[in-house]
Image (cartoon, rainbow, N blue to C red):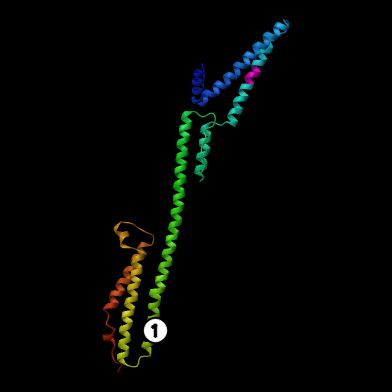
Amino acid sequence: MKEICRGLAANFCESPSSYKLAVFNAAIIAVDIAASVALALLLIRVEPAFNGWLLAAALVVIGLLISVSASMIATRFFPAPFDKIQAAVSEAQRGNLGVRLDGGPLADDQIDQFTATVNQMLATLEQRAHEMRWLSRELMQVQDDERRRIARELHDEAGQSMTALLMRLKLLENSHSLEEVRKSAQELRDLTAHTLEEMGRIALELRPPALDEMGLDVGAGEERLHLFEFVGRFAVHFAEMDFAAEIRPVD
């Protein structure tokens, strides 16, 4: 007998929510009718002249009202699982991926399975969002480190080279012989070629050839490529010039 009762209880717990609500209402109505009939028979036995059946009918009506009220209260305080699912999905759409579903007391196996699936999807989305935020922070850090590195290289390489160029030009202004002028011009040529070579190297690092080989496109890539090509052409043209040969004595 206990096994039968346990089996019935298990089947009832696994039944759909609508079936549970119907059984709940039917139980209220059955108890109300049984109590009304018993009370009417008792009153008729005590006082035969008393119209107990009228009272029984009134009690049945009252029981029906109680049943309807109980159903409304149950629906109000124990909303349908799909209402909770819809509310959770709305929260997720607003960005609150930490929301989780709970089938509640009216849930059945199908709703519990669906709820578990939705919770797993929300957990996966939350994890992906966390990973994307982490990757964004890492990318910003890498970009900041790269900017600092390039600024340091420009200061160390190009800045020092340009300072040396200015000093050489100052010496060239103070040169008194043609031989000194030619020597300073050759030194200026070598120093300028070295500076352009360093600028070309930095420009190349801004757009590595591997990006083009893999077919990747990055922001401002065309501008960086034009800068590298311009520096390269200018360096080649500058290296081919012979400043010493161009210098002639002034008549």
Asked whether residue 63 is drawn in magenta, I would say yes
- Hey, which residue is sitting farthest bottom in the picture? 251
Given residues 217 and 144, the one toward you in this image is 144
Residue 231: name its quadrant. Answer: bottom left
The answer to whether residue 171 is left or right of residue 104 is left
In the rendered view, would you say 5 is above or below 124? Answer: above
Magenta residues, start to end: 61-65
Asked whether residue 104 is drawn in magenta, I would say no
Residue 202: x %, y % from top left: 36, 69
The answer to whether residue 121 is left or right of residue 52 is left
The answer to whether residue 150 is left or right of residue 61 is left
Residue 225: x %, y % from top left: 33, 65
Pointer 1 residue: 167
The residue sitting at 28% across, 77% down in the picture is 239
Given residues 198 and 235, the one toward you in this image is 198
Given residues 60 and 130, the one toward you in this image is 130
Q: Quadrant of the C terminus?
A: bottom left
The residue sitting at 61% across, 28% down in the picture is 73
- Give the main secondary structure, helix, strand or loop, of the magenta stretch: helix
Amino acid at pointer 1: Met
Residue 224: x %, y % from top left: 36, 65
Residue 214: x %, y % from top left: 30, 56
Density class for disc 1 (Cα within 10 Å; few <14, some 14-19, many ≥20) is few
Residue 211: name its quadrant. Answer: bottom left
